[in-house]
């Protein structure tokens, strides 16, 4: 086997839990081959460069093997190799997310009380 559909390969390589999820992500443009949007039926070969955006973090992988069957994780990890630039960018994005402030902490006083809401309403009505 020297080629297979990209949706099957993404499922077999354990990027997505189901083939239908892989198909949806491809249709939404979150999976590209050689920087081009593709269809789920596009066939891939060993050596293709695939960019996958998961959780707003892009991953660039090189296809090292072809499989249409989903197997154990160690076998799936042998189907691809992530590029060094992708690993570095992903590590930076994860670190930036870890260091970013919690959005809930930006609220100064929490939820407004009934009195606060009335005061706000009076100030809006006055304008």
Image (spheres, grey):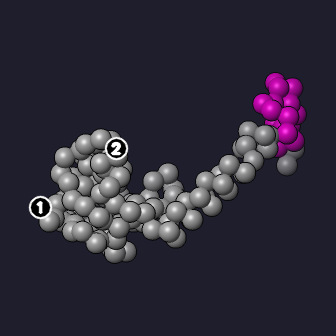
Q: Residue 102: which quarter of the image? A: top right
* In this view, 19 is above or below 51: above
In the orientation shown, which residue stands out farthest toward the top? 114
Where does the image place residue 30, in percent across and percent down from the top left? 39, 60
* Residue 3 visible: yes
The residue that appears at 80% across and 32% down in the rendered structure is: 110
Front one among 40 and 9: 9
Where does the image place residue 19, in percent across and percent down from the top left? 25, 46
Where does the image place residue 4, in percent across and percent down from the top left? 16, 60
Disc number for residue 49: none
Left/right of residue 22 with respect to residue 2 in the rendered view: right
Q: Which residue is mark 1?
A: 1
* Residue 40 visible: no
Left/right of residue 16 with respect to residue 100 in the rendered view: left
The residue that appears at 34% across and 75% down in the rendered structure is: 34
In the orientation shown, which residue stands out farthest toward the left? 1
Front one among 15 and 102: 15
**Dot 2 lies on which element?**
helix
Q: How would you rate the neighbour count of disc 2 (Cα within 10 Å): few for under 14, some for 14-19, many for 20 or more?
A: few
Q: Is residue 101 magenta?
A: no
Q: Is residue 116 magenta?
A: yes
The residue that appears at 85% across and 34% down in the rendered structure is: 109
By secondary structure, the bulk of the magenta-drawn segment is best described as helix
The residue that appears at 68% across and 49% down in the rendered structure is: 98
Q: Residue 89: which quarter of the image? A: bottom right
Q: Which residue is mark 2?
A: 73
Residue stretch rendered in magenta on the structure: 108-124
For marks 1 and 2 on the same chain, the one whose residue lies earlier in the sequence? 1
Left/right of residue 2 with respect to residue 85 in the rendered view: left
């Amino acid at each position: 086997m020297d080629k297979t559909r990209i949706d099957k390969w993404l499922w077999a390589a354990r990027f997505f839990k189901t083939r239908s999820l892989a198909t949806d992500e491809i249709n939404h443009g979150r999976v590209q081959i050689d920087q081009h949007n593709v269809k789920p039926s596009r066939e891939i070969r060993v050596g293709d460069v695939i960019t996958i955006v998961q959780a707003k973090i892009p991953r660039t992988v090189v296809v090292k093997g072809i499989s249409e069957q989903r197997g154990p994780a160690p076998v799936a990890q042998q189907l691809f190799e992530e590029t060094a630039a992708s690993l570095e960018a992903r590590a930076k994005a994860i670190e930036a997310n870890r260091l970013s402030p919690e959005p809930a902490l930006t609220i100064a006083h929490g939820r407004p009380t009934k009195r606060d809401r009335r005061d706000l309403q009076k100030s809006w009505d006055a304008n």
